[in-house]
Image: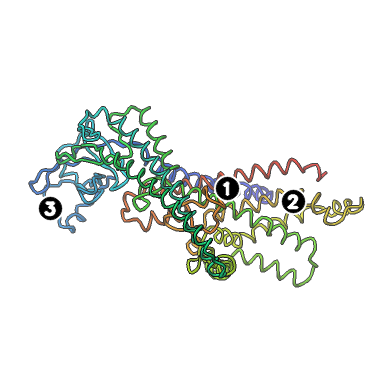
Amino acid sequence: MGKWFKSGSPWIWLTAGAVSLSLIAVLGLLLLIGWKGLSYFWPAPVYQFDISVDGKSQTVIGEVYERKLIPLTQLQDAGFDTSAMTDTHEPRYLIKVGNRERVGLDFMTILGSHIKQQTLADDIAVIDRDQNGKFYGYPVSYIDDGRVLPISELAAGLVQAETIRQELDRIKQEEFSHINWQLENLRVEGRKLVLAKTMTEADQARISTERDALNQAYLVLEKNLFALQSRLESDALVVRDMTGENVTLPIEQVLDVWYPNNLSYIGKLDHWVHQVGKFLRDDPREANTEGGVFPAIFGTVFMVMLMSVIVTPLGVMAAIYLHEYAGKNVLTKIIRVAVINLAGVPSIVYGVFGLGFFVYMVGGTIDDVFFSAQLPAPTFGTPGVLWSALTLAILTLPVVIVSTEEGLARIPNSVRHGSLALGATQAETLWRIVLPMASPAIMTGLILAVARAAGEVAPLMLVGVVKMAPTLPIDGNFPYVHLDRKFMHLGYHIYDVGFQSPNVEAARPLVYATSFLLVTVIIGLNLTAIGIRNHLREKFRSLEQ
């Protein structure tokens, strides 16, 4: 036994066991988040409950969201009559009933003893709407421009409504946006001429003529918009709810209709894929508790890529100076210690620094010098995606510097001396020999920087991220990439949905789904960087020999 301990085998097994437990814990966490999030999009069965409470009968239709066993003592403390309950625990069901505008809440709590009968609701439809959440009911008829049609015409009506809705979105987001952009440019141009005191009557006439032409184009678009909107408003869906009353739902609010209890397994799988696709490509709605997360995905990836473009050259140049040029003295040691200590500074401190230095100082100066015509409305003197990327670049800079320096230190000095002996300058040696050999280490630093930056939320709340961004940082208007705009972020979206949502129970699955998506995005970015690193390692492996 003593020889076995001295051989070091126990420590090898202990290390392997610790690594195995860590991997199991990480994979278990990912599986839990993935299951909780992705199962939300699976079409759950809808039940009809016949209940009786205090002698009053009622019919409730909805999905079983949660089932818990509640101790009778807890029910007694809450004022419930438990005399007819024989067990020590009573099942309590949380039913998602939807129909928010009629019931008042999305969920209803029912005790097991109150349920007289529970059956699958035949031919029940789940109606996804852009307002007031989902609606559960039995479709009765479809109204097309005032004509009452059989419900079989609903599918064609939904396709037509989706086409009109897409055209409305295109007009609002592209054509209206372009006209507003042109009008704003005319306003700024006139403001610049006034400030420079060079405004002439010809300039005034030209600007006025162009503005009138744009306003006329705006009116034409507005007329087309109202015509499309009236076509949507003339259609409706008649549905019988759980009280037996017919409810008319405007088709402009109806996004999708499905019959969960009538779907086969293949149909449910197809519906699940369709819902996941909508979650990835749609915009959020209903205070972020409904809809998709595409703006948050785009904002997260765009900000991380912009941060990578900024932090990589800065970190590499700093590491090259510290390792290749700086003297081996006390000052260099102090700088290295300071760089390492920067990695331990709380991220919120970087957010305060970014707000004060980048936004107010640098951005305010840029506005005063280059965008004075837009003042007092700031352009760069307000939080935006550029300042968020710069703040996270400063936050992750120590990681890139340390990783790059470690890569430079592993390169033998004989390689440098051989290059210099062959007549190359120090700059040529760095560019053609040293940096290619150190590129895998540089990519390792970038991988660590991306992993940390993609999950940061606290500093972004101060320097650019918002709950809802009306437009993306990229559009069809010059200069096409708008680094001054605010953006959405998956990490902040998780915080907002989980802690700021007015409908906690409805938002809980979205927290899991968005968390799983954020982890997937980070893994995707890291795998891309790892692939590039492995390619560079193989490409420049011959230089090490």
Report the residue marked by disc 1: 19
Alpha carbon separation for disc pair 3 and 1: 53 Å
User: Of helix, strand and loop, which one carries label 1?
Assistant: helix
Say what secondary structure mark 2 lies in: helix
Q: Residues within 10 Å of mark 1 (few under 14, many from 20)?
A: few
Q: Which residue is mark 2?
A: 438
The answer for how far apart the CA atoms under marks 2 and 3 are is 74 Å
The residue mark sitting in front, 1 or 2, is: 2
Q: Is residue 150 visible?
A: yes
- Which quadrant holds residue 495? bottom left
Which residue is pictured at 68% across the width and 45% down the height? 533
Q: Which mark is residue 56?
A: none
Q: Identify the residue shown where x is 31% and y is 37%.
A: 44
Q: Amino acid at mark 1?
A: Val
From the top left corner, tell me how far across and down residue 357 is, in percent: 57, 69
Could you tell me which secondary element the residue under label 3 belongs to?
Answer: loop
Instruction: Kindly identify the amino acid type of the residue bearing the numbered disc 3.
Output: Asp
**Mark 2 vs 3: CB contact within 8 A:** no
The quadrant where residue 402 appears: bottom right
Which three-letter amino acid code belongs to the residue tagged 2?
Ala
Front one among 282 and 170:
170
Query: Could one spot residue 354 in this view of the protein?
Result: no
| Tag 1 and tag 2, C-beta contact below 8 Å | no
Q: Is residue 4 above or below residue 183?
A: above
Taking the image as shown, residue 529 lies to the left or right of residue 407, namely left
Which tag, 2 or 3, sits closer to the chain's start?
Answer: 3
**Quick one: which residue is furthest to the left in this view?**
55
Return the disc, 1 or 2, that comes first in the chain's sequence.
1
